[in-house]
Amino acid sequence: MLATTQTTDLGGSGDWTPAEMNAAIDSYLQMLRKELAGESYSKTEYRLALAGTIARPEGAIERKHQNISAILSERGLPWIRGYLPSAHYQQSLTVLLLEALAGLSPIGAVDEVPQPKLLSFDELIVPPPQLPPRSPTRGNTRTAAPGTLAQREAMNRTLGRAGEKYILEVEQQRLRAAGRPDLAARVRWVSELDGDGAGYDISSFSNEGQPLRIEVKTTLQNINTPFYLTAHELRTAAELEGTYRLFRLFNFGKAPRMYQLSGPLESALNLSPILYRADPTCIPGPEHQPGPPDADAFGL
């Protein structure tokens, strides 16, 4: 925690100085790391400690922490749930925050995947989040932080596999509780047994025996954390329609919950193109490259 004996450039009112913003960023990131690690901490203690180093009231400090949450949320990074994003902030805060993040080890990096208690389907399920439309100016800013949490989690096969295994057991438990042990025995972990080519992870059934095809997206973070979909997964969701389910499993390892979406997914999600296929066969060979300009073209 920040030492209360430290002092920084005291702005007091008006726009925050760079020193004040850096102090707020440091305090926020300390709390965020504790939250991601599942450690207990007091927001009040951190806020009071910060108030002892800068000439800002506690309310202003809380609003600045909400600004930091907004910047992190817009870039797919985890943020402190107690500080709801507030988008009215100095642009210089974005620059200072990204500089601070660049000098740190990745926030939210997945080293060890926890094993949460198995909950029933009814205990896990919550409504999907209702988020406001993405800001057209800030949501697509060129200063997006590299290596976002969603990207790291998408590449972390250990986390993805743990989430799939968890949902496999949840589905088997649901069907047994519904009096369908015959269907529970037929639930298959498709991505583990057959690979990723199917476009979904688990083959299951409704209580009435109708087939369900489930794609699992797992995060250690909160319900608003974005996730990645492949073009194949989107096509599969559209083709399977009513038999397709996307289970977004969040807070995995602490108090897991999930929401579900049916196919097709385009109407239920704000989709942003992140990668494009680039075909090098369209690049002209050396014999087709333009030569030096013709002197006659310039009247020389």
Image (cartoon, rainbow, N blue to C red):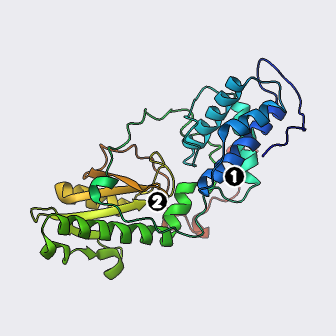
**Which residue occupies the foreground of this view, 285 or 124?**
124
Give the amino acid at mark 2: Phe
Circle 1: residue type: Asp
Q: Residues within 10 Å of mark 1 (few under 14, many from 20)?
A: few
Q: Nearer the viewer, residue 155 or 43?
A: 43
Assess disc 2: are there few (<14), some (14-19) or many (≥20) residues with their C-alpha within 10 Å of its C-alpha: many
Element class at badge 1: loop
Distance (Cα) linking label 1 and label 2: 65 Å
Q: Is residue 157 left or right of residue 199?
A: right
Toward the viewer: 200 or 178? 178
Residue 11 in picture, x, y percent from top left: 84, 23
The residue shown at (64%, 48%) is: 32
Circle 2 SS class: loop
Q: Give the residue pinned by disc 1.
A: 294
Image depth: mark 1 or mark 2 in front: 2
**Where is 273 relative to 205, above or below?**
above
Q: Write down the quadrant of residue 8 in the picture.
A: top right
Q: Position of residue 117 (x, y in %)?
A: 41, 65
Say if mark 1 contacts mark 2, CB within 8 Å.
no
Q: Which quarter of the figure is the C terminus placed in? A: top right
Coordinates of residue 110 in the picture (x, y in percent)? 58, 65
Q: Is residue 200 visible?
A: no
- Give the side of residue 212 with respect to residue 21, left or right: left
Q: Specify whether residue 40 is in view.
A: yes
- Dividing the picture into quadrants, the one containing residue 48 is top right
- Outermost residue toward the left in this view: 208
Q: Label 2: which residue?
A: 252
Q: Using the rendered view, name the quadrant where residue 288 is placed.
A: bottom right
